[in-house]
Image (tube, coloured by chain):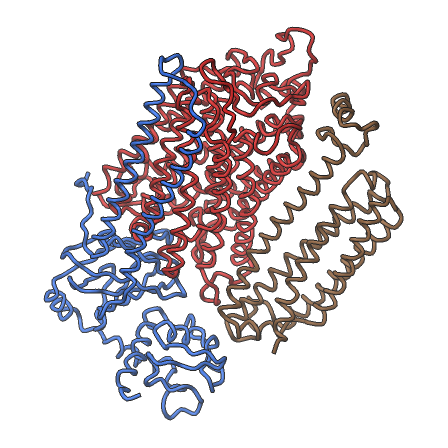
Chain colours: A blue, B red, C brown
Amino acid sequence: MGEIEIVLPAASSAAVSTDGKLVGLLIISGLITLLVTCLIGLFAVRYRRGSEASRDRLPNWFAHDLETVWTLATVGLFVAIFAWAASQDFALAVPPEESVEIHVVGKQWMWKAEHPGGQREINELHVPAEETVELVLNSQDVIHSFYVPAFRLKQDVVPGHTTRMRFHTEKIGTYRLFCAEYCGTQHSAMIGRVVVMAKEDYADWLTRQPEGDDLKEDGKKLFVAKGCAGCHYGSSKVRAPRLAGVYGSQVPLSDGRLVTADDAYIRDSILQPKRDVVAGFEPIMPSFAGALTEGELVSLTAYIRSLAVTETNR
Amino acid sequence: MSDIPYRDVDVQGEKPGGRLMEESYLGEKFSIWSWLTTTDHKRIGILYLLSTTLFFFIGGAAATLIRLELFTPAGDLLTDDGYNKVFTLHGVVMVWFFLVPVIPSVLGNFLIPLMLGAKDLAFPRLNLMSWYLNIIGGGFAVWAMLAGGVDTGWTFYTPYSTAFANSHVSLTAIGVFISGFSTIATGVNMIVTVHTMRPPGMGWFRMPLFVWAIYATSLIMLLSTPVLAMVLTLLVTERLLGLGIFDPNRGGDPILFQHLFWFYSHPAVYIMILPGMGVVTEVITCFSRRRVFGYAAMVYALLAIAVIGFFVWGHHMFTSGQSMYASLTFSFLSFIVAVPSAIKVFNWIATMYRGQITFEASMLYAMGFVGLFTMGGLTGLFLASVPVDLHLHDTYFVVAHFHYIMVGGMVSAFFAGLHFWWPKITGRLYPETAAQIAALLMFFGFNLTFFPQYILGNIGMPRRYHAYPDAFQVWHVLSSAGAVILAAAYLMPLGYLVWSLIWGKRAPSNPWRASGLEWETDSPPPKHNFLTNPTIEGSVYDYHPAQEPRREPADD
Amino acid sequence: MTEAHATTAASANHATVSPALASHFHDLRQQHAAADLGLWIFLATEILFFGGLFAAYLVYAVLYPDGFLEAAAETEIVIGTINTALLLTSGLAAALAVKAAGADMRRSVMVLIAVTIGLGVVFLGAKGYEYWLDLGHHLYPTSPDFPLAAPPAKLFWSLYWMMTGLHAVHILVGLGTWGVVLFQTFRRSFSLTDNSRVRIAGLYWGFVDVMWLFIWPLLYLMGRAT
């Protein structure tokens, strides 16, 4: 039998404030449970059949007023707890100045992470301490859920969607990583660890990793290999939008809408090209759904993102 | 079932002469065929009692396997696949073939016409059909289990269930689909009966709260179950015909499945708990010998839960990536839906105030219900708070939470009701001391089983794990030990209740001196329930021991 | 059994007891109220059943407006519209049959039910022909030659088959019910005025009609908007 664990380490800033809520709720519900238990116990003893306690008639206002009082008290208490808990959501919803963005792909039954520099790892995630990290999550097959108890955070990883999970790391250490959404036979083997390292150690660690291709370099190769360049490159005959400078810009669509070309838009345009057709172009692009793995999509997106940077004066 | 020898089951001989005589519903005809084609609501209630008991022990066997497997951190007793199939079976059988039908279809079937002074439910043949649908649905589920099992979990999340699982998903889904129509049939029957068959003199606000609870439950059944039927239809057609409504590779969205599924399944939680609240109200008033505190508030609370319960489904999806505003709205509504539950808890306790309390087994179960339901409800607040749920969602905390409601609440309430009305149903008294011991054992076994799971969830143990890190073991061992006690506590009533059928003392028509029309007829009731038309005088729960004045003039 | 209900019926001021009265009801009024309420509630569940499907349609139509318009242009609008007319006319016949039953006009009831059934069968025939055309155009989502490129088109056609298929199943159930009622009317096996059978069948048929009035614009008319 392993060592007994009762208290989880709090390794992210969210963990600290969530623990505050948890303890608060624990105290409130503990008190209410205690009250309920004591009252049941007290009445059971005091008003057992034949006991001496008074059963005088209660005044008429008693029932009505008591009902009103505890209804209002419960409403007030519950709304207050809600507001207290919701305040944390609003605080966390503010996007940070800058963050380390790491792409994570869930598949039956492993986690694959890819750092901005192209370093890859499986069932492990190394992150710098005292830093905001944003995970960009995709699934290759079924729904998974990225759960780090020490961060008090989990985020479902849904096929067909890109979800994000943001946390600010606080404490150096190694923490458990679970898949929290049932995903098939080896669901309980889809586990790993998250290593929070000092910034210098993290930088060190990155350089020690095998020289993986840079994400965007990878994407550039794919751009040619998968035939994207045939249409979306300068000299091609087919009329298709150029991609330089597209990322982050406002794109007018054929139906008059205006969308921001972000990661999700790029991804959707590759998988469902007919959904949001750019104004002035024909909907002729075939879908690449099934032709690209999640990892390849991530690389392609990274490449298209990098094209925005080179085009500075748009 | 008709092989159980009811000796002297007709109570004619005992009656002081002069009254109209009719054979009891049990003694009337005895062949198996007469039971299988009966349209008597009481006999159908008994059929449901037998079938839900069977499903309870199938689901219980699966639970036993789960607890045995989790005794050690390594996945050694079952394979991973085997474990997944066992917990799926446990969920499917317990939810749809035990918890949903157990109180409405067993006690509700038996008691609603009696409590309303009616001869039967509005549609007796529909009632029998609903039992057959339940059996056929359960048959499909058991067939799927014998053919190799299902491994999707009872929630059938797509795209795993549609595109990846190789097990008998369609078969199980069809079983659940069929049983859904059984639920709808019961719901229609109950609502129409309550609306059209109340006796003269029994206005809406003079009905027993058990009737109100079944009425509110039926409303939820009718409005939510069809959505489950549709979502299962889409699931099965996606598996069998390749229609891609939920398949991301064909433009579909797996999150839509979750919305539709929880639109049913969250209200379904209230299908499982409201009838229990009704039972507990009857039991607590009877053994406290007090009028229920705040009758009108109790009614409005039931209806409020039934209505608001439809608007909180999104709290199952806080981690799915839905927008923060959607999450906060669902979070707010989830806090609001907890208010009527809290009101009910306070009213039960206030009913005991200045009572003349005795501690028959039903009362022990009911008091256990109030405590456990309170704990289950309060831990629901944790899960309704978005940031806390991000941590606790899909961990053992959730498992503990809903078992406190479903097992600590609903199963306790069922046992409370079963013991309370057992003399009425069978005409026999059960042995009181044995029943009290079983009730206490169940309470302690339950807490030992499920309280450690709150701690497990809080230290991060995810659900549906077949092997787990060593550090979690001590809590799992405690939980498994509790499960042994719990299993023993569930087997005890099976023993002494069956014993009472043969050797139990014959029950008088009102052994608890309870109020309510069902106690005015014989135990067991005659085939047509009442030999003379029952009369309604005063309000329900007219318990007035010497010390208490008859009634307070302000009738809420 | 007869004894028991005779006493209660007498207490409810009924001199003679109709054979249509089931033994557990006090009087016919109560029995009719129960039957009507039961069917209305059942129809409420049916609306929620289709509601799940309509919700799915709505979500995807909002998500993929263009794909849905494009796919919806491929449905057979002529057959769909003729079918709408057929079904509405049969609905009229059904409503008249209910009225006639209330007035105890046995012959009219039989004729009107026959008309209802006839129109329903023609509806199903036309629907079958339409399905045959759709299959010929490979307009089913698992077809390797599915003619529309955009993924949402497959979603639309999945929903098309589900909606019309489930509706056709309801038509079949309705026709079966009418068949039984017609046969029983012919055999004079129930009293038209004391029994709510014709009204119940009529209500159900009305529901099936109304469902089609939601399906028709969604599947057939929407694609012709531009």
Q: In this view, does A64 lie to the left or right of A177?
A: right
Q: Which image quadrant for residue A232?
A: bottom left
Q: In this view, does B372 lie to the left or right of C154?
A: left
Please name whichever residue, B294 or A27, is drawn nearer the observer in this view of the structure. Answer: B294
Instruction: Please state the horizontal and vertical placement of residue B404, each as a whole percent of the image.
Output: 37, 36
Residue B275 seen in this snapshot = yes
Q: Which image quadrant for residue B379?
A: top left
Give me the residue at 30% from left, 34% from top.
B479
Instruction: Please state the horizontal and vertical placement of residue A69, each as a whole percent of the image.
Output: 38, 37
Give me the residue at 51% from left, 74% from top.
C150
Please name whichever residue, A31 or B538, is drawn nearer the observer in this view of the structure. Answer: B538
Residue B43 seen in this snapshot = no
Please name whichever residue, A96 or B469, is drawn nearer the observer in this view of the structure. Answer: A96
Instruction: Please state the horizontal and vertical placement of residue B300, each as a whole percent of the image.
Output: 50, 39
Seen in the picture, residue B512 relative to B59 is either above or below; the reply is above
Instruction: Please state the horizontal and vertical placement of residue B305, each as a whole percent of the image.
Output: 47, 42
Q: Is residue C133 left or right of residue B155?
A: right
The image quadrant where one finds the N terminus of chain B is: top right
Please name whichever residue, A314 or C120, is drawn nearer the observer in this view of the structure. Answer: A314
How many numbered marks, from 0 up?
0
Q: Which image quadrant for residue C189?
A: top right
